[in-house]
Amino acid sequence: MTANALAPSVEHLLRDLAPQVLGAVARRHGDFAAAEDAVQEALIAAAVQWPSGGVPANPRGWLYHVALRKITDHLRSEMARRRREDAVASEVWAEWAFVPPPDAEVAVDADDTLTLLFMCCHPALTPASAIALTLRAVGGLATAQIARAFLVPEATMAQRISRAKQSIKSSGVPFSMPSDGERAARLGAVLHVLYLIFNEGYASSGGARLQRTDLSGEAIRLARGLHALLPGDGEVAGLLALMLLTDARREARTGPNGELIPLDEQDRSRWDAGQIVEGVALVSGALARGAVGPYQIQAAISAVHDEAPSAEDTDWAQIHALYGLLERMSDNPIVSLNRAIAAAMVQGPRAGLDLLAALDDDPRLRGHYRLDAVRAHLLERAGDPVGAIEHYRAAAARTASIPERDYLTLKAARLAAPAT
C-alpha cells in the first residue's frame, strides 16, 4: 500500500479505471450487465476504503478482484433464491471459477476499452441507448451528466441505461471485437459517443469547472486508438482532427480564476501549435480522399478558426458556407444556431437574428440556454441593450455550468450599468 491517501476523486477513478476493469471483468465473466454493476460496487468500495487505508500498489488489480468478488456474491445470492446455494457454495471450484486468490496474476493489463466501446454500440440497442450506455461504461459519466447531454430528465436516462444493459444481456452478444461488417455498422454510433464525451470534457454541461480535461483527453485517446484501427476512414480522421483543433484552444479558454474567455478575446499565442498542425494535416488528408462527412466539415471549420491570426482576420464567409453545407447533411439545431452566428458575422446581426427566429419552435432547442445566449449576443451587437440584458439573464438562469452562468451574468450587469 502506498502512503498517500486517495488523490483522485471517485469520479476520476470511474473515468480512468472503470472502463479497463469493466472490459476485463466482462471478458472473463461474459455478462456485461452483471460486470457493470459489480465494477460500480467495487468503485464505491474503493472510495470508502482508500482514503483511510491508502491506495493499493495495483489499484486496477484491486478493483478487478473486488468486482469479481461482487459478482460471485450476487451469484450466490441468486443460487440461494433458487434453493441451490448450499450445494453449490460448498464446492471449492465455485470460488475458483470466478475469483482468483489475491496473489494470483490477473489479466487486466490489456486495454479492452475499444472492444467495450464497440460492444456498447451493438445493433440490439437503439442509437440513443447505445450512446447513453457507452457514456456510462466507457466515458465514466454519471447518469445526471448524460441526462444533461441528452436534454432529458435524470430518471428517464437511468431507465434508458437500465434497459440498454438488459438488452445487452438478452442479446447474448459475446465480449469481443466485432467482425469488419459489424464494426462498420456500429461506427457511426461510436463516433457520436466519442464526440459527446469530448464535448462534455471541453465544455462541461454543469458544475464549477468550465472544462474537464480528463474527459476530453480520454476521448482523444480513444479516437487515436480508433484511427489506428481504421486509418483509411475519413470520418474517423475527421473526428480526431476536430478534437485536436478544438482542444488546441483549451488553455486560452479560461482565465486565472477559471473564468470563461470567449474565442474573440483569447490570447492566440497560448493555442497549442502542435495540435493545430496535426489536426490540419489530418483533415486535409481526409478531405483529399473524398466522401466528405459531417466530422470532416466541422474539423474544417475549426481549422479556419485556428489558422486565423486574429479574430478580425477570421474567414467568416468560408465558415458560413461550411455551416450551410453541414446543415444540409444533418438535422441538428446546434448546427443551425452556429450558422446564425456565422451569418451575423458576414451579413450583420439582424441576419443572424432572423435565422434564430426559425429555431424558436424547435422543441430540441426551446428553453436551451445557448439559444438565449446567442440571441443576447446578437441583440447587443444590433444595438438593443435591453433585449440583450433580458436574454443574457435568461441564459444565465438556464445553464448548469457555473463559469458560463457567471460570464452571462457579468455581460448582463455590464450592459445594465449606467454609463460613466
Image (spheres, rainbow, N blue to C red):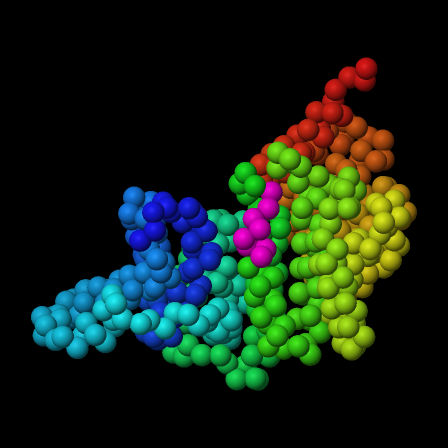
Nearer-the-camera pick, 190 or 314: 314
In the rendered image, the vertical position of residue 308 relative to residue 123, given as above or below = above
Quadrant position of the C terminus in the picture: top right
Residue 211 falls inside the magenta stretch: yes
**Residue 4: percent from the left, percent from the top?**
37, 46
Nearer-the-camera pick, 100 or 283: 100
Residue drawn at (85%, 31%), measured in percent from left and top?
383
Residue 82 falls inside the magenta stretch: no
Q: Quadrant of residue 397?
A: top right
Residue drawn at (53%, 63%), measured in percent from left and top?
131
**Residue 32: percent from the left, percent from the top?**
38, 70
Q: Quadrant of residue 224?
A: bottom right
Q: Is residue 177 left or right of residue 345?
A: left
Q: What span is in magenta?
A: 210-217
**Residue 168: percent from the left, percent from the top?**
41, 72
Magenta stretch secondary structure, dominant = helix
